[in-house]
Amino acid sequence: MAQYNHWMNQKIYTICAEVPNTKRNEDLGAFFKSIDGTLNHILVADRIWFGRFTQNSFVSKLSDILYSDFDQLRQERDRTDQDILNWTKQLNSEWLEAPFTYTTITTPTKTVTRPAWLLVTHFFNHQTHHRGQLTTLLSQLGYDPGVTDLPYLPTL
C-alpha cells in the first residue's frame, strides 16, 4: 500500500502541476474546498498518523494549509512518502497484530485502542478516499487522472 500510495501521489501531483495555481486554490465545493486544500489535508493526516506510529508526535488541525507553495507541498509529499516507504519495510506481524492506543485530534482527552493493522489500513485508505475526490475535481476541470487501479501499480 505504501508503494501504491507513492505511485498515485506522484501521478496526482504531476497532473495538479498542470492546473493553474488560481484554479488549484479555487473553492470547488470539495470537503477541503480546493485541490490544494485537499492535498494539504492528506499530508496533514498522514503526518499525524505517521507521528503516532513512529512516536514522533505531529500536531495540526486537519484543515491546516501546511504549504501554500505548490512546489514545496509537492517536495514535502514526496519526502513524507519516502519516510512512509522506509517505515513499512521494518513493520512486522507482531507489531501489526498488537493493540495500538492513540489520542484523537477531535477530542484530545479521549484515547482509542485498536489493532495496529486496522489503523495502518485506515492510514492508507484515507489517502485513497481523498485522492478519489481529487480525481473527480481534476476530471471536472478537464484533466484525465488516468488509471488509478491498484493492479496497475508498476513493478518496482
Image (cartoon, rainbow, N blue to C red):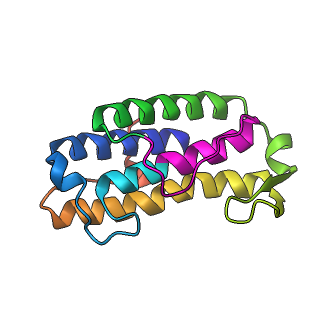
Quadrant of the image occupied by residue 140:
bottom left
93 or 142: nearer the viewer:
142
Residue 6 location in percent, x, y?
A: 44, 39
Magenta residues span: 43-66
Question: Was residue 46 drawn as part of the magenta stretch in this picture?
Answer: yes
**Picture residue at 23% right of the left edge, 53% below the top:** 24
**Picture residue at 54% right of the left edge, 41% below the top:** 2
Residue 21 location in percent, x, y?
A: 18, 46
**Picture residue at 43% right of the left edge, 36% below the top:** 77
Above/below status of 68 relative to 72: below
Name the outermost residue toward the bottom: 29
Above/below status of 22 relative to 142: above
Question: Was residue 101 drawn as part of the magenta stretch in this picture?
Answer: no
Quadrant assignment for the C terminus: top left
* Tally of marks: 0
**Picture residue at 56% right of the left edge, 46% below the top:** 46
Q: Is residue 156 visible?
A: no
Residue 51 location in percent, x, y?
A: 68, 39
Q: Is residue 29 visible?
A: yes
